[in-house]
Image: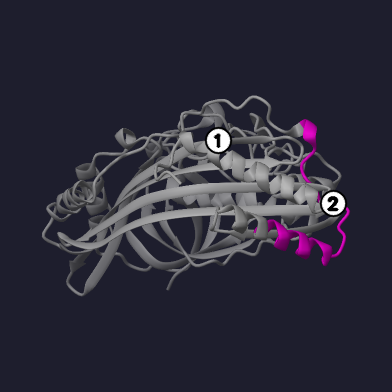
Amino acid sequence: MPQEIDATRIPELSQVIATALEQARAAGATQAEADVSLQKGLTTTVRLGEVDTIEYHRDRGLAVTVYFSNRKGSASTADLRPEAVAETVTKACAIARHTAADEYAGLADAGALARDIPDLDLDHPWDIEPEEAIERARACEAAGLAVDKRLRNSEGATLTSHRGVRVYGNSHGFLAGFPSTSHSLSCTLVAEEGAQMQRDYWYSVARRPQDLGDGGAIGRRAAERTLGRLGARRIATCRAPVLFSTEMARSIFGHFVAAIRGASQYRRASFLLGAAGEAIFPSFLQMQERPHLPRALASAPFDAEGVVTRDRELVRDGVLDGYILGSYSARKLGLTTTGNAGGIHNLLVSGGPQSVEFAQLLRRMGNGLYVTELMGQGVNAVTGDYSRGASGFWVENGAIAYPVHEVTIAGNLREIYRDLVAVGTDIDEQGAIRCGSLLAGAMTIAGE
């Protein structure tokens, strides 16, 4: 096969899928679907000015799923030769014949599939050579280390460039694919002062290499964040408001997304069970899904089942409008797929006209904890009980007073969502969930 991975490979990959679907039909499958992808990438890490790792990876894969009425079987391979494809289809059929029937199993409804595939400008290759990647990573780290003599160590600076092309097809006649890229640059530094050692990081990720943040600025931001943590102390156990940085706020809303997924709902493993139509958040909070934003990191013209993706108001004035569904979970719940097989597509969170700047969030909080890092996995998806290790800064009279570490913040996600105070305008667009800093009401902060 040709070595380049780009849109020119789509006809070739489409033929692989067409062959697999035809073989599945010939074997007696009533429905079938296949997904094939090619990927390549370069990852370079420099630590203390020396090359730590250079990784060049190249992957391919084919996944085939067949249905014999309501019996489902899946198999996959990394070999795209005709004989390997035929063997994969045979294995999927053999599995399907021995599985239990599931009345909800099957392809997405034909009427829900995407017909027009918009170009979302997701493919921006970067033909960067390892030598240039090394120099960019080295310059990023050096800029950070040069900020202060207390920055005596580093976990390295890493540059990554990735490109892939994916094609999906099924026996309803759907067959489409698109290429995409992502590039990133990050730096993690370690500062020492006396007996104390602290670490922190900064990063940038984008579809286009020219949209990446300046390497020197990334290194210096990592340095400033690391130095700011020196002198961290524990605080006495208390109840106080908590302000989550933009990166940490994303995780708070990530728990919400997980709770309203179809699988969590039909398994009855969600603290938001049956919550559609309820006021989950204060009335100022809005959430919109925007799958077709050009060059956005979570944009997609169709989901993992070929279902068209559409703009959606997920939360209006604090009220949950519905769930996040693929076709299987939708059937289990007696609902319709929302085009979210495979995940959410650019969830935009805002406080509407009540969104405020970060400085105003601090003033509104008065005294409390500003969280910049969370640790551990202490979240109960069924009850919503939340308890995680945290570090950040103590805020007094609306201003950052000193760094804090070795504390735990705890509460219940239902109550945290209900008692949100404000959302910041400092929106982080480097992920599937786009939001600003998040000011929550009083939580238990366990310290000394």
In the displayed structure image, the side of residue 59 where residue 265 appears, left or right: right
Give residue 422's position: percent from left, percent from top.
52, 39
Provide the residue designation for mark 1: 11
Please tell me whether residue 329 belongs to the stretch shown in magenta: no
Q: Depth check: 372 or 64 in front?
A: 64
Residue 178, numbered circle = none
Q: Amino acid at mark 2?
A: Tyr
Question: Does residue 274 appear anywhere in the picture?
Answer: no
* Alpha carbon separation for disc pair 2 and 1: 32 Å
Badge 1 amino acid: Pro
* Disc 2 target residue: 104
User: For mark 2, does the 10 Å Cα neighbourhood hold few (<14), some (14 to 19), or many (20 or more) residues?
Assistant: some
Q: Residue 29, relative to residue 208: is it above or below?
A: below
Residue in the picture at 33% in, 52% down: 42
Identify the residue at horizontal 13%, vertical 56% (top origin).
148
Please name whichever residue, 302 or 89, is drawn nearer the observer in this view of the structure: 89
Range shown magenta: 88-111
Mark 2 / mark 1, whichever is N-terminal: 1
- Identify the residue at horizontal 70%, vertical 56% (top origin): 89
